[in-house]
């Protein structure tokens, strides 16, 4: 067929499927967006119902919120992660701040932001929708940002040298080298963030403004109502709807992204590419769709070429990056002063309702929760690192495991809590011990997903070299695969650890019906203080929690990050 032949752009059967898929997506987005701009009173006129017939609409609303939060999280990841990885002074503030942000309970974010979002769209559902999207964003962004930061810190030096040899501007280097290099890990962490967001959907779809609670239609509010009414049939319907939604966005979004990200692996030999997404096949075999997407590709290519002429001179860039010694000291002094002022105000507020004996009590409870987090992280590491390596090194197995792993990660752990209460009471078990595993139910998957991402991105030529030198057994784990996946594992362990602290607030106090079990720990302390409205004690608990999280990260995880950056880069 000639290049200019009209038959080249004649629609085929693949175009029909593509058109139907795009049209369906646009209709669904329009329907969900239109309801978001409805008057706020419509939520009271049409309250959430446990009728399973409403689940398709609820699933649409929840999915649109999670996708919107994921887009915002991606933009935040690129900006925040780049600044933290490339600016040493900013890194001194941004990474500890990220440690703190991931340990702050989601209810804390909602409490301080909901009024502002509601004021942006008074009398409209959109204000509550934005508050819910922001709450879901806080459950997605930190994991993705840690992954991107880790990738930028471990870009091979020879690739950076090549980018300088081609005189790429910072803008071009970002899109042509750094983002593609981060894709394997970022895609898997985006999947984990999307799945992990389901745990917080229940809290994010019930917005409290003063004495009024605004319940947004969605699967999360459906689950919350089912738990309140102890309706196991409704819970089963909600789990089925979640499974259907996860399978849909796995096929339409994440499976194509995983297959596409494989081409960015750093290796010299060809390896098993794994499966192929039917959606990518549809796009490639369609005639009209590539032609319609071509102008968009040309626009971004032209944008990259245009930025090449605006590249800063190396001398100026070096001065901006390095600065002077006195500027560094001024920056450190400014950070110290701001930190001390903030600490002073926090201590003054806590002192209005707590004393030193209360602080000693909270610190002791925090150490108990710290012990739980460390033990659970070690157990999750022992279990999921071998599984993740085995799956990640086999692309075809990863393709089959991917939707199952997403469903397990997305399954709301709070649905398991009532069964745990029944078992603990029936067998007269100790709550301090047997409530502890509930903390890691929803966070252990961060380790699995990141290890799968690290093993999937492991260069095939290094695997062949190890095989040629007959490196096997424990030596293969110690000298080959563990150093290769260490940066990815650290990312997963940091987010799993931070998520476990966050989950302790609901895991250390579990109830079903009239039975409530409490374990001694910082999470139970914060939960009790929140329910009683004792805000000085709430702030004290959160401050101790963030201090312990930061201490753990600084003492263990960040040194591992720096070790991976210095010793394990593929230079």
Image (cartoon, rainbow, N blue to C red):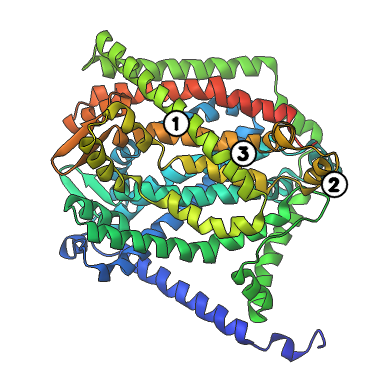
Question: In terms of secondary structure, where does tag 2 sit?
Answer: loop
The disc, 3 or 2, on the residue closer to the chain's N-terminal end is 2
Residue at 80% of width from left, 31% of height from top?
315
Residue at 77% of width from left, 50% of height from top?
308
Q: Is residue 294 left or right of residue 385?
A: right
The residue labelled by disc 2 is 166
Question: In terms of secondary structure, where does tag 3 sit?
Answer: helix
The residue labelled by disc 1 is 376
Q: Position of residue 32 (x, y in %)?
A: 36, 67
**Residue 488 numbered mark, or none:** 3
Q: Name which quarter of the figure residue 13 lies in.
A: bottom right
Q: Nearer the viewer, mark 2 or mark 1?
A: 1
Residue furthest out toward the left: 514
Q: CA distance from mark 3 to mark 2?
A: 29 Å
In the rendered view, tell whether residue 56 sits above or below residue 97.
below
Q: Residues within 10 Å of mark 3 (few under 14, many from 20)?
A: many
Q: Position of residue 357 (x, y in %)?
A: 25, 9
The disc, 1 or 3, on the residue closer to the chain's N-terminal end is 1
């Amino acid at each position: 067929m000639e290049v200019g032949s009209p038959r080249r752009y004649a629609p085929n059967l693949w175009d029909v499927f593509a058109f139907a898929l795009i049209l369906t997506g646009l209709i669904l987005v329009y329907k969900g967006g239109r309801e978001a701009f409805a008057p706020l009173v419509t939520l009271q006129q049409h309250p959430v119902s446990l009728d399973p017939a409403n689940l398709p609409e609820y699933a649409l609303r929840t999915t649109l919120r999670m996708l919107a939060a994921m887009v915002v999280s991606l933009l935040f990841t690129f900006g925040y992660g780049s600044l933290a990885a490339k600016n040493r002074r900013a890194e001194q503030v941004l990474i500890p701040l990220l440690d703190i942000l991931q340990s702050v309970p989601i209810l804390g974010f909602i409490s301080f932001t909901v009024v502002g979002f509601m004021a942006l769209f008074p009398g409209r559902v959109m204000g509550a929708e934005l508050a819910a999207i922001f709450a879901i964003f806080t459950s997605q962004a930190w994991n993705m940002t840690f992954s991107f930061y880790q990738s930028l810190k471990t870009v091979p030096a020879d690739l950076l040298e090549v980018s300088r040899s081609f005189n790429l501007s910072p803008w071009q280097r970002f899109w042509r080298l750094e983002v593609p290099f981060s894709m394997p890990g970022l895609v898997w962490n985006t999947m984990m963030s999307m799945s992990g967001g389901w745990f917080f959907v229940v809290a994010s779809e019930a917005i409290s403004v003063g004495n009024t609670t605004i319940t947004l239609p969605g699967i999360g509010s459906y689950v919350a109502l089912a738990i309140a009414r102890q309706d196991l049939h409704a819970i089963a319907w909600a789990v089925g709807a979640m499974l259907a939604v996860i399978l849909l966005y796995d096929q339409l979004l994440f499976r194509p992204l995983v297959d596409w990200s494989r081409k960015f692996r750093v290796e010299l030999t060809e390896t098993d590419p794994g499966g192929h997404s039917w959606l990518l096949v549809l796009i490639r075999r369609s005639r009209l769709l590539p032609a319609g997407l071509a102008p968009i590709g040309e626009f971004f290519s032209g944008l990259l070429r245009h930025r090449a002429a605006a590249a800063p001179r190396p001398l100026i860039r070096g001065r901006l990056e390095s600065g002077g010694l006195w500027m560094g000291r001024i920056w450190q002094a400014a950070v110290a002063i701001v930190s001390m002022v903030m600490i002073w105000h926090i201590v003054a507020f806590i002192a209005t309702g707590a004393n030193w004996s209360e602080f000693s009590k909270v610190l002791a409870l925090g150490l108990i929760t710290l012990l739980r987090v460390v033990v659970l992280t070690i157990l999750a590491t022992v279990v999921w690192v071998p599984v993740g390596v085995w799956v990640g090194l086999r692309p075809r197995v990863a393709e089959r495991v991917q939707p199952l792993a997403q469903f397990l990660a997305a399954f709301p752990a709070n649905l398991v809590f009532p069964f745990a209460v029944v078992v603990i009471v029936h067998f007269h078990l100790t709550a301090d011990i047997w409530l502890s595993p509930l903390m890691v139910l929803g966070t252990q998957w961060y380790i699995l997903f990141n290890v799968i991402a690290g093993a999937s991105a492991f260069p095939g030529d290094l695997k062949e070299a190890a095989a040629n030198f007959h490196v096997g057994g424990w030596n293969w784990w110690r000298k080959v695969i563990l150093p290769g996946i260490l940066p990815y594992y650290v990312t997963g362990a940091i987010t799993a650890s931070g998520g476990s602290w966050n989950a302790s607030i609901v895991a250390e106090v579990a109830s079903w019906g009239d039975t409530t079990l409490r374990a001694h720990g910082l999470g139970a302390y914060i939960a009790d203080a929140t329910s009683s409205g004792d805000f000085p004690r709430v702030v004290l608990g959160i401050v101790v929690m963030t201090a312990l999280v930061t201490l753990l990260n600084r003492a263990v995880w960040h040194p591992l990050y720096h070790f991976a950056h210095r010793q394990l880069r593929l230079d």
